[in-house]
Image (cartoon, grey):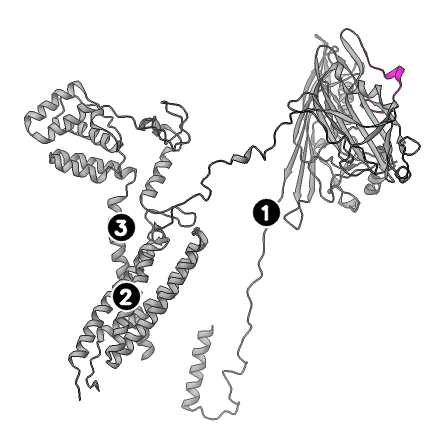
Amino acid sequence: MKVIAYLAFTLLSILIQFCVMDLTQEKTELDDEQVAFNGTSHKKKFHELMKDFTQKPHALYYQTLMNNNHRDLDFRPSTKTFTNNSLQRLEISTIISSTIFDELYDDNMSTTEDPFTTESLYTSTEIDNVTEISFFDKNNKTVIKPKVPKKPRNKDCGCDLLYNVCDINCCCDNDCSETEKDIFANCKDAHKKMDEIGNLCYPYEHFFYQENNFVDNLFCIIKTNLPEKRGKDLKKYDIDAVAHSHKWHSEVKSKHTEFQKKPYVYGEPVWVLKDGSIWYIDTPSPTINNYCTGRKPIMFLKNENIKCIVKLKDLEMFKILKTPQEAPCISVTEKSLNSTTLNCSTLHCTNWTIIVCDEIKCVDYNKSLHEPSCTETSCTNLALKLEYVFYYYDSKIINATIKLFSQNISLDVPFMNQEINVRFILTNESIEKVIEVSGNPGYLYGRPLIASTAESNRSLNFFNVTSPHIRYLVQPSNKEGICTSLITENNFVMFGLNKRIKCRYVYHKSIHFQNGTNICNDIESSLEELFGLNNKLYVSPYGNPLDVKDSDWLSIQTNLYEKDITYGQFVTKNSKLRCYNVITRISYIITFADVSKVTIKRENKIVSININVSARNVTLTPEDMSTVLTIDTNFIDGTKPRVYEYAGGPHINIHLPKDFFFPFPSNGIHVTKQSYNLIMLCCVMYLQIK
Amino acid sequence: MSKVTNVNSSLAYEILLYLNSFYLGMFFVCEVAMGILKAINVSYPENALLTEAGIFCALCLVEVIRIFLGRRGNLASKKVPVFFSVVLTIPSAVGVCYFLIYQTYILRLEYIWCAVMLIFHALELAFAILFIFTVCKHQQFE
């Protein structure tokens, strides 16, 4: 009985509570209706207002109405045109609405700004007779639309940049009319937001507000009592900012000029010995623009890549060719630490090795062969790109090499781009014998794709310096407009680098007019060779192929075999060769994914690589045996978002003994009433547990 | 020395207190839940959350004592506990008013249940005063 009474009272209390809640909510909603308006309610209210006005033309009534609503309503000027045959009702509405609009539009509006309209309103409402209505008729003929006073400039409107001109898509710009705001992109949404705020429901992130949702409405924050925000530091600026800010130096001085007799440490300049004095090596560098106007020292173990614009006479190679033999590179050794004199007998001196490189190979610099020379139009053997390579081993620089990448340059261009690379290698091996992986273990962006043509032991072949097989995936590149497929760094397919190359393929062999198909097939074969399709290629899934099994290397899939057969024929009239189904486009599609187990580090693994070729018909002439090729590279990130699996809840395996419901022996005694009750109780318990 | 001989318990007062005890439980649970919801979703000024939590705990404590004294006094027809219950109605109502008006973020739902709580207070105050008058009226001295 007590339990039933308890439940009954609980239900009653809940019932009372909900009744009171509903009552309060209805009251709240009623209150809200008086305050909140959206776009449609504006119009409705406006029409109602106009309707009431025509029915009860009394000044006090409208003034009261205006005062009540002028903060919430956002009236727009009437765009209706009125004809002379309309009744005074409409005309009164027009003027009144305009006047109301004026009043509502700006709290600070003075009646003197628009005396005519204001005067009309008050005249009509004060007298309130037919004569005044005819007076309105007269007014209507002269002035239909009252002028809308301009709002003062909104200082908090960040997008209002044009003075006295409406800024596009700036909803808070007071220079914009309502018509202009209507055609803007987001002003309607801004109005809607304003309405929501006007409805006293703060749109916090998790406190959603939906107009007709009762439950969500309950979770609205209807009032806040937050303290006024105050900046702790009332000073708007720091007077001492000048003192502790970085400024341009007033005089040129270097902080790297002091030589200390100690072994090299990271960031120290690389020293040279010249005429018994210690100097540091420096390279040109851009300072305030892209021109090589400044110089900075080569820092020990700091690899650099400097690009700047320079005049021909200021090319760095000229300085290099003048000085290095006289100024060997020095390293401080233990022997020199105990000595007071500084010369090559006490210091470890390393002479410079200058080599000249072209696209294919590098050779030692020979003054007679490689000295730069210029004619009136061009210069030869100029190195716009040069590279310092320092081999540091056993606590001293054992080799200092300068690579000059020579080329011919036209003198038409007064300025040229100069590129200087500085590289340090901590080995006594030549840089050509150092194998570089493309990541460990996953690929790093911008590193070449590791590939192999070997049928077996591909990983071993990669790390074998003497292996004849290729190490990196090569694609044709554009060299002065012509397609080249040299095994250089420029031609490597770099991980993550999507690009499209267009270049012209030129068929150099002489053509015979007997059989067009043979020539076209030969062109096709050379194109396949150019694209590297003549060999079976494998790509390492990881940037470091050390532990990658042969079976894990990815075979490049190609649709070459799906292509139609190539054939050709001469068009005898104009001696043109028409080749059908020649490869003109090749597309590398490489799919990779992040397979790392932790989120902080990516481990890019290539999961598939496809080469798609596209063929078309090409017409060649004996004068121009060339066609334009397109090479596309697409890297697709196929990483799937991580899916977390949560452990299931604890499973309690509780069950009653098998003989729980039949605890009586088989030669059972007569079941008493108590036993019957016990069985019933157990059944109820079982059903409840279930 | 005086001795109360008549039984003057107010049924309406008892019902109100009884319902209020359930309502207080609901109020406590919902207000805590709402506090957690607000603490997660909106930022509070420094110490405001702790202050509100403290006031809320004090309010609940006062309410429990108030209802307990009210019921005890009513059932035993003793005016002193009821008088203290009436006195405790003042801080309790002030506390509810704080949550109704002055807390940092006021949700519409809180508006509703604080208002209901105040209605309880008002009714109980009225019946408690009536009860005290009744007890005083029927008091017999030996």
Q: CA distance from mark 3 to mark 1?
A: 45 Å
- Disc 3 vs disc 1: which is toward the camera? 3
The span picked out in magenta is A357-374
> On the image, which quarter does residue A674 sit in?
bottom left
Q: Secondary structure at mark 2?
A: helix
Q: CA distance from mark 1 to mark 2?
A: 58 Å
Percent of width and height locating residue A489: 76, 29
Above or below: residue A365 compared with residue A201: above
Crowd tier of the residue under label 1, counting other residues whose Cα lies within 10 Å: few below 14, some 14–19, many 20 or above: few
Q: Does the segment drawn in magenta span residue A267? A: no
- Disc 1 vs disc 2: which is toward the camera? 2
Percent of width and height locating residue A24: 26, 56
Q: Secondary structure at mark 1?
A: loop
Q: Are marks 3 and 1 on the same chain?
A: yes
Percent of width and height locating residue A571: 71, 12
Percent of width and height locating residue A260: 81, 35
Q: Which residue is mark 1?
A: A641
| Residue type, label 2 | Ile
Q: Which residue is mark 2?
A: B90
Q: Locate residue A346 relative to residue A235 in the image: left or right.
A: right
Residue in front for this viewpoint, A51 or A615: A51
> On the image, which quarter does residue A673 sit in?
bottom left
Label disc, if present, on residue A29 of the rendered structure = 3
